[in-house]
Image (tube, rainbow, N blue to C red):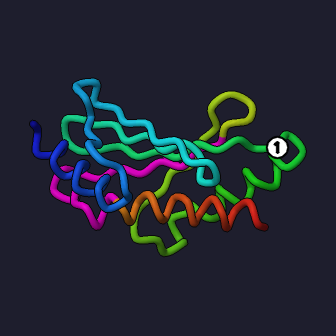
Amino acid sequence: MDWRDQMIADAGRGMGLEELDFSGSGVIKLEFERRGDVYIETREDGVLFYLIRKVSSYDRLEVLTAVLQSCHYSQSTRFTLLPGMQGDDDLFLCSFLINESFSRPNIEGVIKMMGEQFDNITSM
């Protein structure tokens, strides 16, 4: 078992998810009813996190404007967030943790921050 599998398993237990690991594929997908789909993907030098949520076509312009403003470098956030679109209606936020920063508190912090950012954006 890779050290990152051990770390993600520990974080998973903290979220009530037993036996969470990268399963050789290097990708974990967590589906949350309210939060959206969280993907955690291993890379050679770190781990990529991204949260995807559907965006209404009626609100798309306002939501895109809000997400770009909230992810601007002038906003003070613990982790760098990058926004993007997948197709016409899937908005995502992603963040990257280098291997040296991949720890249970940071795993939980990134997932929590992405969810909070989405909640703030969609409530505007």
Label 1 neighbour load within 10 Å: few <14, some 14-19, many 20+: few
- Quarter of the view holding residue 80: bottom left
**Image spot of residue 27 (x, y percent):** 34, 32
Q: Name the one closer to the observer, 33 or 60.
A: 33
- Quarter of the view holding residue 71: bottom right
**Image spot of residue 39 (x, y percent):** 44, 40
**In which quadrant will I find the C terminus?**
bottom right
> SS of the residue at dot 1?
loop
Identity of the amino acid at label 1? Ser
Please tell me which residue is depicted at 37% across the width and 56% down the height of the picture: 16
Q: Name the one closer to the observer, 111 or 83.
A: 111
**Image spot of residue 121 (x, y percent):** 69, 62
Residue that protrudes farthest toward the top in the picture: 25
- Asked if residue 118 is positioned above or below residue 28 in the image, the reply reads below
**In which quadrant will I find the N terminus?**
top left
Q: Is residue 71 magenta?
A: no
Q: Name the one closer to the observer, 61 or 48.
A: 48
Q: Which residues are magenta?
A: 91-107
Please tell me which residue is depicted at 59% across the width and 47% down the height of the picture: 36
